[in-house]
Amino acid sequence: MRIVIKNARLAFPDLFEAVQFNGQGPFSYRCTLLIPSDSDVKKEIDAAIKETADGKWGAKAPALLEKSKALGKICFTDGNLKDYNGYADNWALVTSRKDSDGAPAIIDRDKTPLGKGSGKLYSGCYVNAIVDFFPQDNEYGKTVRSGLVSVQYVKDGESFGGAAPVTVNGFDDLGFEEDEGDDLA
């Protein structure tokens, strides 16, 4: 099931280069989306997870979801259970995309592509995202996971890492002078 998530806070973004989780397993792109606990978006995600589980496991779905939640093996968890900046009073949706499936679409507000050097996507900014929910039923367990499709920058937010976002605003355009010499004093 695919949904569009609007105005989520971005955390732990690995969006421009595929990485391994804890240095193991396949390479993937990933991020965490922080969703306010009292928001309609949280209700929409809960409904998508329930619908995905019901579609796969039917009457067994509620028990499987409870077990997944208790073990911390589901894509959507209570942020109050984590000791990370920005997680309090939010729910954390962990979403990823296999490197073999190609990079997610990463765009600016006006839908132009964003590159790694843009400085716009950092832990703490606000984004929209498109994600797919799917059942996991393999040797690693039964649960619901989230697949990352695309991310759109929305606006700046306070950085969770403490560093301000990269910007060139505030500089004057000095142009170019032919006879500047080596004297910078």
Image (tube, rainbow, N blue to C red):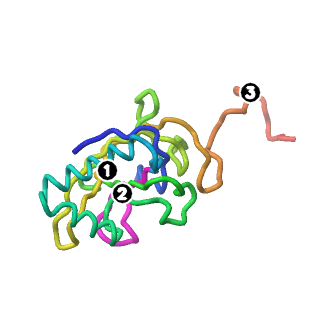
| Left or right: 169, with 54 as reference point | right
Q: Are marks 2 and 1 in contact (CB under 8 Å)?
A: yes
Q: Name above or below for residue 123 compared with residue 26.
A: above
Q: Position of residue 102 (x, y in %)?
A: 27, 49
Select label 2 or label 1 by which is in front: 1
Residue with the mark numbered 1: 46
The quarter of the rendered structure image containing the N terminus is: top left
Kind of residue sitting beneath label 1: Asp
Where does the image place residue 81, in percent across and percent down from the top left?
48, 66
Crowding at dot 2, Cα within 10 Å, few <14 / some 14-19 / many 20+, comes out as many
Residue 73 horizontal/vertical position (percent): 31, 67
Residue hosting label 2 = 76
Q: Secondary structure at mark 1?
A: helix
Magenta stretch, residue numbers: 19-33
Task: Name the main secondary structure of what is drawn in magenta.
Answer: strand
Q: Residue at x 87, y 41 (%)?
A: 185
Q: Is residue 29 magenta?
A: yes
Proximity of marks 3 and 2: CB atoms separated by less than 8 Å: no
Q: Earlier in the sequence, mark 3 or mark 1?
A: 1
Q: Earlier in the sequence, mark 2 or mark 1?
A: 1
Is residue 139 shown above or below 86?
below
Q: Amino acid at mark 2?
A: Phe
- The alpha-carbon separation of the residues under discs 3 and 2 comes to 56 Å
Q: Determine the residue positioned at 33% across, 38% down.
A: 4
Disc with the residue nearer the chain's start (3 vs 2): 2
At which x and y percent is residue 70?
Answer: 34, 70
**Which residue has dot 3 on it?**
177
Secondary element type, mark 2: strand
> Height in image: 22 above or below 185?
below
Q: Amino acid at mark 3?
A: Glu
